[in-house]
Amino acid sequence: MNLDFQKSNGLVTAVIQDYASGRVLMVGYMNEEAFRKTVETGFATFYSRSRQKLWLKGGTSGHRLVVKEISTDCDRDAVLVRVEALGPGVCHNGYQSCFYRRLESGEWVESESRAYDPAAVYGSNE
């Protein structure tokens, strides 16, 4: 599928956008295997840089991302994945989007309410 996985040490940046609203939900990374699984299964799969392994978004929470469309940038080193989000939120902190903080007067402020209780979904260690 001719993406440039070599430019960033085997990874491409994956921008995840809500198909209906256009809101950016999260940014993750995919290696070739994660990208292939995303295409084959229709569910967004990522590569965890910290754990050094694949992870299916929603594998624990059930808040999966159903792929509707995938585009790449001009350099083919990033993808835009437009999805339908299953569940109340994408962010592991309990928000609809990982981009729930906004810079106001030099301070980061939470710009929305939590969509779900992360402790109830992931346990108290998250």
Image (cartoon, rainbow, N blue to C red):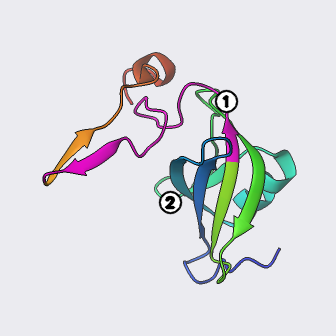
- In the rendered image, residue 40, in percent from the top left (x then y), is placed at 86, 52
Query: Which of these two is toward me, 49 or 57?
Result: 57
Could you tell me what secondary structure mostly forms the magenta stretch?
loop
Crowding near pointer 2: few (<14 within 10 Å), some, many (20+)?
Answer: few
Residue 86 relative to residue 37: left or right: left
Query: According to the image, label 1 marks what residue?
Result: 86
Q: Which dot, 2 or 1, sits closer to the camera? A: 1
Mark 2 or mark 1, earlier in chain: 2
- In the rendered image, residue 56, in percent from the top left (x then y), is placed at 66, 43
Quarter in which the C terminus is drawn? top left
Q: Which mark is residue 49?
A: 2
Query: Which of these two is toward me, 28 or 106?
Result: 106
Q: Which quarter of the figure has residue 33?
A: bottom right
Which region of the structure is painted magenta?
A: 83-105
- Going 58% across and 83% down the picture, which residue do you hit? 7
Q: Which quarter of the figure has residue 124?
A: top left
Asked whether residue 95 is drawn in magenta, I would say yes
Asked whether residue 103 is drawn in magenta, I would say yes
Quarter in which the N terminus is drawn? bottom right
Hey, which residue is sitting farthest right in the picture? 40
Q: Is residue 77 above or below residue 100?
A: below
- The CA span between labels 2 and 1 is 24 Å
- Going 54% across and 78% down the picture, which residue do you hit? 8
Residue 91 relative to residue 15: left or right: left
- In the rendered image, residue 91, in percent from the top left (x then y), is placed at 47, 37
